[in-house]
Image: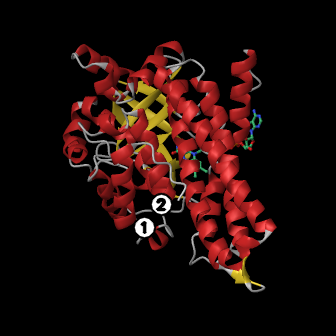
Amino acid sequence: MYYDDDGGEFRENLRAHLEEHIEPIVDEADREPLTREEFLEYTGVLRELDIGFEPGVAEEYFGNLERFTIVSEEVSRVWPSLNVALQMSFPSVFVQHAADVTQDAMLDKLHDGECIGCLAVTEPEGGSDTARPNTVAYKDGDEYVLEGKKQWVGNAPIADVALVVAHDDEADTQDMFLVDQANSPFETETMDKLGWKGVNNGKMYFDDVRIPEDNRLSNIVGNALMDGADMQEIVPFPESVSQLFFEQKALNATFSFMRTGMSFMAVGIMQAAFEEALEYAEERETFGDPIGSTQLVQEKLYEILRDLETSRHLSRHALELLKRGDDRARLISSLAKAYTAERSVDATYNALQIHGGEGLKTENRLERYYRDASVMTIPDGTTEIQKLIVGKELTGMSAY
Ligand SMILES: Cc1cc2nc3c(=O)[nH]c(=O)nc-3n(C[C@H](O)[C@H](O)[C@H](O)COP(=O)(O)OP(=O)(O)OC[C@H]3O[C@@H](n4cnc5c(N)ncnc54)[C@H](O)[C@@H]3O)c2cc1C
């Protein structure tokens, strides 16, 4: 009950598909970071509903804001790690317009839905400061040489391609570089963490890693445009988000999109916790009555539903602004990401508390909901950084 029924048939089909194929395996599958084979198996389940990054499918999933947010919410209601693993694979789309050697090595995989991607921004020296990467790309003939370290990168240890943020030494500016494991091998190391256990986050080491100059992102985009591709074919973002590329910085528009997805992810986690808390409150009896008949448990249910519904409405507001290409999208998506992440920590804590000792058992899901919610406040910019973005958007003055 209390399902969000908007989204019609697509949401209904997705929910049924997840209940059938993912719900029965999630408790075991989420205990360890996904191997490559597991990633392909579980994202394969989503591909059956045209959710993925193969050409022709990416536009339907990533290019459709309504669908993208429904997927984020519904997949996260069942398995947040799967939502993140899938989403963070998006750089694989750039293979289509990359250097010939990368296309030769990766294009078939991309078409088969087997090219795993990752986005490498964060560095050990302080992830919040994304403006000044220490990773350097310097030119050597017709190649770039990458030197540096990244960490926390989702999918890195199982990725075929990585989109790596680095300082372009020659142009003296920040750019991104597509690195494929087949032609330009890089070392990785899996990192363990509190929640999102299924996501294979990792450290990455770039030590004299050589890539063709055509794999610099600005070259990938420029070459594709010269070949007659339009922007939507190169980056399958929704048109309204691509529009914001020109009004705001491309990276800011990208983050507005990703943070809106994160907000819906928090809603999905809260929805799952709410359903289990309500069911348990009705079933569990103490002192001869269901615990749901007590005022303090009803207060907790009230608080969970309040957090869930306010988060859902704020997320939808962010979605509406993005759809319109409204320049307030950046402010509201940051506000929504920070707010929903914090609410999901509160809501899953309340749901866990309603379950008493049962909530702490690792064989139940409550402790996973709480761990997964706790992670929400860090990636894609911490809650503190979201506050500073809102402050900057409001005042025009940067406090960071
Ligand atoms: C599970 C997970 C998945 C991730 N996935 C990816 C990924 O796929 N790709 C990727 O590139 N990165 C990824 N990240 C990295 C993530 O984006 C960073 O962890 C995050 O941006 C924070 O950086 P940091 O951990 O270095 O913290 P720091 O930047 O060291 O911050 C530490 C603390 O100081 C606060 N702080 C920092 N600067 C300021 C300031 N100016 N004012 C106020 N407070 C400040 C922060 O809010 C935080 O509380 C992931 C991280 C996690 C945990």
Residue 129 visible in this rendered orientation of the protein: no
Q: 337 and 245: which one is in front?
A: 337
Report ligand 1 position as a quadrant: top right
Q: Amino acid at mark 2?
A: Val
CB under 8 Å between callouts 1 and 2?
yes
Question: Residue 33 appears at what percent x and percent y?
Answer: 48, 63
Residue name at image x 50 percent, y 26 percent: 322
Question: Residue 85 appears at what percent x and percent y?
Answer: 44, 52
Q: Which mark is residue 23?
A: 1
- The residue labelled by disc 2 is 78
Q: Residues within 10 Å of mark 1 (few under 14, many from 20)?
A: some
Spatial distance from mark 1 to mark 2, Cα to Cα? 6 Å
Residue 108 visible in this rendered orientation of the protein: yes
Q: Amino acid at mark 1?
A: Glu
Residue name at image x 49 percent, y 47 percent: 205
Q: Is residue 358 left or right of residue 100?
A: right
Mark 1 and mark 2 lie on one chain; the one further toward the N terminus is 1
